[in-house]
Amino acid sequence: MSLYSKNIDNILDEYDANFDHYKSYKDRLVVILKELFNKTTIPIHSVSGSIMSRGELRSKLIAAGAIYNSLGDIHNLVSLTVVTYFYDDINLSLSLIGKEFFVEEIALSELEEEAQKHFGILIKRHSLMLPDSKNGRVENERFSSVRAELKVRTSLQDSWFLVKNVFNDIADRDNLTISEIDQLAQVSYLLKAADTELCRIKTSLAEKKEQDKTANQNLELEEVQINNTEQETNES
């Protein structure tokens, strides 16, 4: 058995011993994020979390070129997904989350860069940690060194990734032909266009609502002025 094989066994043993720890952290992060968005007017479809399975962890450890010295080197054991309804709420959501956590964008892998070019669906991943100001709290001390992966997507983007994963599994995981990739790309661009159109409609409705509000305020002001004028005339 090689030295790295022994290290893999040690990492997997550490994972087994700390599984409940990671589960507690995932549950806590989901609660915090839900409470955070409940205090805003940003419409959110869902906030969810997951933990990498032991099988997924082992596959990651034995992947070609993978070298991990400890469990702490793996930053997506805990994953969080925030699903928005509108594309223009993604950056707003990230800004909001950044006020509560330390958030850092993760560089995409070559495969992810290639997928983004093919399908046109924006892929962004972030690393999330509790800031130092919160690590000092007793209830947070055991989570101080744990990083989680954060993904913020629209509901259409999220549906796309879920469906694409099904196709990947059918085609023996990321083994789609060029023709199949082109066919899926057509669907992804339709979803991207739909995201853009939904944002345009939302903006248009918001502007109309603001215009109606202003018009009603002006009408009320005119009525008050007319009433005041009539009252002054009657008094005279």
Image (cartoon, rainbow, N blue to C red):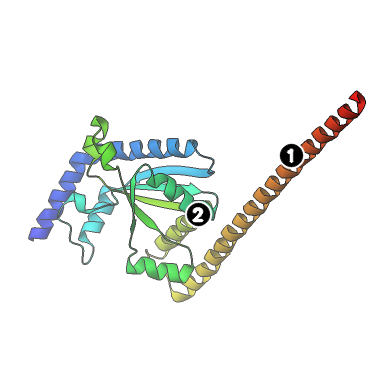
- As drawn, the label of residue 129 is none
Badge 1 marks a residue whose secondary structure is helix
The residue drawn where x is 20% and y is 50% is 72
In percent of width and height, residue 97 lies at 40, 45
In front here: 190 or 209? Answer: 209
Q: Are marks 2 and 1 in contact (CB under 8 Å)?
A: no
In percent of width and height, residue 167 lies at 45, 62
Badge 2 marks a residue whose secondary structure is helix
Identify the amino acid type marked 1.
Gln
Between disc 2 and disc 1, the foreground one is 1
In front here: 56 or 136? Answer: 136
* The image quarter in which residue 101 lies: top left
Question: Badge 2 is on which residue?
Answer: 159
In percent of width and height, residue 58 lies at 23, 54
Identify the amino acid type marked 2.
Ser
Outermost residue to the bottom: 178
The residue drawn where x is 7% and y is 59% is 3
Question: Badge 1 is on which residue?
Answer: 217
The residue drawn where x is 46% and y is 53% is 91
* N-terminal-most mark, 2 or 1: 2
